[in-house]
Image: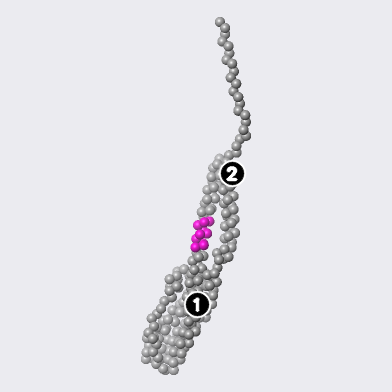
Amino acid sequence: MDKSVIGALLALVGTLIAGFLSTFVSEHYRRHCNRTALAGALAGELGSYSEAWPLAHENINNAYNLALSGTEIKLPKIEKSTDRVFDSCVAQIGLLGPDLADDLAYTYNNINAFRVSIQAASEIHSDPVRQAAMLQAALASMHRANERGKQLPEKLRRVARERYFQKWPWLLLAGCSFCAVIVAAFLFGAAYGIPSQATSTKPMSIQSQPSAASPSR
């Protein structure tokens, strides 16, 4: 095979490898950025809930004790609220891994169950027994959400603080190795594709031979 063809093939292979690596690494880095941003947003949302939890638990527990004693209480009309961050990115929680995704789904479902129970209790005005049952269900949901979710904000903050090459150090090593291979392939291809120059030789002088003398008349 011609040396120039081999050099072109090596350069083509190097270009294909470089294109594959750049696509893979860029997509992997994009997913890492989405993961850390999602973790930071969910940590902030759950952190705000955990700060309000003690006061909310105290108020609902007091209302439950009153209803349990037979006292008619009138809770303000409560509209079911939503979780802005979780609801907007629920399809992406798989980026956080199976364990965090499991804890998040369990915690947020119990938060939703708490809201449903509180909303139902606020619609009951003359039945303390039913109201106490709804408030008891709300307290149980709060307890389950707190037990599973109290460590979630800190876990999510650790994910949000991750650095790309600290999380994936092998990618840095692999990238440097592949870059070295690509450079070597380009250099080898360029060197192999240039045909070697032949050694210069002195041009042969062409001496004109005298033509044969024409016979004398």
- x, y (%) of residue 70? 42, 94
Q: How many numbered badges does the structure rendering display? A: 2
Q: Which residues are magenta?
A: 21-30
- Report the amino acid beneath label 2: Ala
- Report the amino acid beneath label 1: Gly
Q: Is residue 14 left or right of residue 110?
A: right
Q: Mark 1 vs mark 2: which is more N-terminal?
A: 1
**Is the residue 49 above or below the residue 166 in the image?**
below
**Mostly what secondary structure, the magenta segment?**
helix
The label number, if any, that marks residue 191 in the structure image: 2
Along the line of sight, which residue is nearer the eye, 51 or 178?
A: 51
Along the line of sight, which residue is nearer the eye, 208 or 65?
A: 208
Characterize the local packing of mark 1: few (<14), some (14-19) or many (20 or more) Cα atoms within 10 angstroms: some
On the image, which quarter does residue 162 sit in? bottom right
| Residue 98 is one of the magenta-drawn residues | no
Quadrant of the drawing holding the N terminus: top right
- x, y (%) of residue 51? 49, 80
> Which residue bears the numbered disc 1?
47
Marks 1 and 2 sit apart, C-alpha to C-alpha, by: 61 Å
Q: Residue at x 45, y 73 (%)?
A: 86
